[in-house]
Image (cartoon, helix red, strand yellow):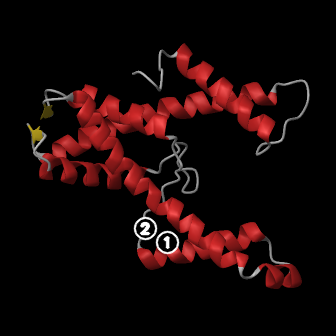
Amino acid sequence: MLLAREFVAYISRQIVKELSPQWIETTDPHVAATFIAGVIEEDLAVEDHLNEEVRELLSQYGDYMRREGVSYQEMFRRVKNNLIQQRKVIRASGRDSGDSMKLSRDKINDISHKVVAALRKSRDFRLKRDPNDVRLQMVKVMTEVLHTEDKVDRAARTKIRTQKRDIPEGTEEWDLLHKRYYAEELKKLGIDLAHG
């Protein structure tokens, strides 16, 4: 998934914290955050499933791509773009669409519509303002959190680049260092993904 489950849970807790009690009313903030996280995860999983489907399709054409000299990455991008257009999926990755954040502005808007629709259907919530106003406030909260995440990610990447030796992105060592530095940078901002 584009965002770690822990980060989705954090975003959800922030939405509940910032929107309660002025925008939404709920009897249990923990249940509310879990509910919102579920809606976000379900939406982000759509693109994950699409990626899996593209990988499966391309596995059948490995010989052809080698013979024709077509790069896997290029074919992956082409096939995925075709499926996104056919199925009218909103691309999740902001970096693919020119946004600096992990989620595109379009995806944030799409998710906010889905969360508000789910909140309206649930008996555990009551919207205290116009649904679109609640949605816009949710977009604001999500965008702020994602801007902070972008700064944290860039700081973690910078720490890795400043190592004495080159550590290629995608290697196990790079992933471990990124995870460690990412967590350190979040803690500097007072963000603990597990608790708040």
Q: Which label was assigned to residue 140?
A: none
Q: Are marks 1 and 2 in contact (CB under 8 Å)?
A: yes
Q: Is residue 175 visible?
A: yes
Characterize the local packing of mark 2: few (<14), some (14-19) or many (20 or more) Cα atoms within 10 angstroms.
Answer: some
Question: Counting residues from the N terminus, which is met first, the one under dot 1 or under dot 2?
Answer: 1
Q: How many marks?
A: 2
**Label 1 secondary element:** helix
Residue at left 33%, top 29%?
14
The picture places residue 85, in percent across and down from the top left corner, at 47, 75
Q: Would you identify the image quadrant in which residue 162 lies?
A: top right
Q: Quadrant of residue 159?
A: top right
User: Disc 2 designates what residue?
Assistant: 89
**Above-or-below relation of 19 to 122:** above
Q: Position of 123 compared to 70: left or right? A: left
Instruction: Judge left or right: residue 18 versus residue 178.
Output: left
For residue 155, say whether it is visible.
Answer: no
Return the x and y of residue 179 as percentages of the image width and height.
65, 31
Q: Amino acid at mark 2?
A: Val
Label 1 Cα neighbours within 10 Å, binned few <14 / some 14-19 / many ≥20: some
Instruction: Write the residue at 80% across / 35% down.
Output: 173
What is the x, y in percent for residue 177? 73, 29
* 12 sits to left or right of 113: right
Q: Position of residue 111 (x, y in %)?
A: 34, 52
Q: Quadrant of the C terminus?
A: top left
Query: Which residue type does callout 1 highlight?
Result: Ile
Query: Where 11 sits versus 111, above or below?
Result: above
Query: Which residue position is annotated with label 1?
Result: 84
